[in-house]
């Protein structure tokens, strides 16, 4: 029997080489999968459905800024409640620079900070995005389109970092695609062009800890009688929306994680303060 002798440290060297080769192979597979999708073409298909949402006070000054997206040809638009909270009126700006008023609220889920508006678009919405009811797999690649800090039609990419369950709240997507103030309400889209979630908040501590409400919560909102925006803004809001087969959602905004780790994103332009955060009961921390 032949006995092979290796110099001291050779085993560690072989393990290091094997690990590097495995990492290179995984990277090649990931890049090959991404290469199958024409990202510039996909982004051009997504952007016309994404808008900048602007809220104004009684003096006509911009006090709220965020993102949103159309979900059907009839002009229904999804964004976050906190994007327009406190505004006297609001409008959206499309990619081509056209502006349209937020006419009425047709559904909302305050527990998940979601709201659906009817937007008055005379010619109809030429582009809209399909919303997926399925939770994504961890590691699935995603794009986020929105107006961070007012930079319209900004695209960032990353992956689904996790799907977290918050007691009493449900499941929330964690994503590595960067978001910033005014990204709130923008779509989180997979490489098929489907909306997987709505960019909603980020954690102030740590790095690149971003979260989105799953698309299923968008689909679960049931349309009610339209409430004119002015009436809604004055506090005359629709009753809590009942999800299919589930109890009524809470009537007041809820915080998904306790402050100071939660940072919502309505702080643009400068001087605009985020809405106060409700405390989370100790049992849920």
Image: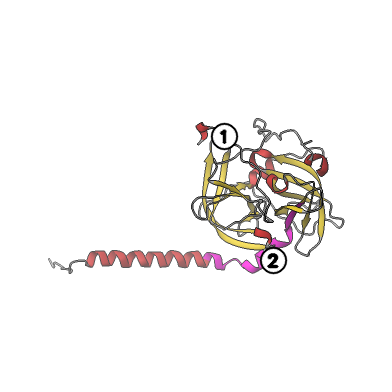
Q: Quadrant of residue 127?
A: bottom right
Residue plotted at (61% across, 40% down):
277
Q: Position of residue 29 (x, y in %)?
A: 47, 65
Q: Is residue 198 above or below residue 245?
A: below
From the top left corner, tell me how far across and down residue 12 is, in percent: 25, 64
Give the residue at mark 1. 168
> Residue 35: where, in percent of width, then height?
56, 68
Disc 2 packing (10 Å; few <14; some 14–19; many ≥20): few
Name the image quarter holding the N terminus.
bottom left
Q: Is residue 147 visible?
A: no
Residue 63 highlighted magenta (yes or no): no
Q: Residue at x 86, y 58 (%)?
A: 123
Question: Quick one: SS at disc 1?
Answer: loop
163 in relation to 284, above or below: below
Looking at the picture, how far across and down is residue 276, in whole percent?
64, 41
Residue 92 appears left or right of 173: right
Question: Which mark is on residue 41?
Answer: none
> Observer-nearest residue: 111 or 19?
111
- Residue 53, magenta (yes or no): yes
Q: Is residue 120 above or below residue 40?
A: above
Residue 252 sits in quarter:
top right
Can residue 252 be seen from the camera position used here? yes
Q: Kindly indicate whether the residue at mark 2 contacts the one at mark 1 (C-beta within 8 angstroms).
A: no
Instruction: Choose the circle earlier in sequence order: 1 or 2.
Output: 2
Stretch in magenta: 33-55
The residue labelled by disc 2 is: 44
Q: Mark 2: which secondary structure?
A: helix
Q: Quadrant of residue 48?
A: bottom right
Which residue appears at 66% of the width and 68% of the height? Answer: 41
């Amino acid at each position: 029997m032949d006995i092979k002798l290796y110099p001291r440290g050779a085993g560690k060297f072989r393990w290091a080489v094997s690990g590097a080769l495995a990492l290179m192979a995984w990277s090649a597979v990931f890049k090959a999968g991404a290469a199958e999708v024409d990202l510039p073409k996909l982004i051009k298909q997504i952007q016309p459905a994404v808008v900048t949402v602007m809220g104004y006070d009684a003096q006509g000054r911009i006090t709220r800024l965020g993102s949103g997206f159309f979900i059907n040809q009839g002009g229904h638009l999804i964004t976050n409640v906190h994007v327009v909270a406190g505004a006297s009126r609001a409008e959206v700006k499309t990619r081509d620079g056209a502006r349209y008023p937020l006419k009425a609220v047709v559904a909302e889920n305050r527990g998940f900070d979601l709201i659906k508006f009817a937007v008055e678009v005379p010619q109809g919405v030429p582009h809209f995005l399909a919303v997926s009811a399925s939770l994504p797999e961890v590691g699935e690649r995603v794009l986020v389109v929105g107006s961070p800090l007012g930079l319209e039609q900004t695209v960032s990419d990353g992956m689904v970092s996790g799907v977290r369950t918050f007691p009493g709240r449900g499941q929330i997507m964690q994503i590595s695609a960067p978001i910033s103030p005014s990204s709130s309400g923008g779509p989180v889209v997979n490489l098929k062009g489907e909306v997987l979630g709505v960019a909603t908040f980020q954690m102030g501590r740590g790095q690149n800890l971003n979260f989105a409400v799953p698309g299923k919560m968008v689909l679960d909102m049931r349309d009610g009688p339209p409430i004119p925006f002015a009436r809604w803004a004055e506090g005359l809001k629709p009753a809590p929306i009942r999800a299919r087969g589930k109890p009524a959602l809470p009537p007041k905004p809820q915080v998904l994680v306790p402050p100071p780790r939660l940072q919502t994103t309505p702080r643009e332009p400068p001087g605009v303060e985020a809405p106060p955060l409700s405390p989370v009961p100790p049992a849920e921390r």
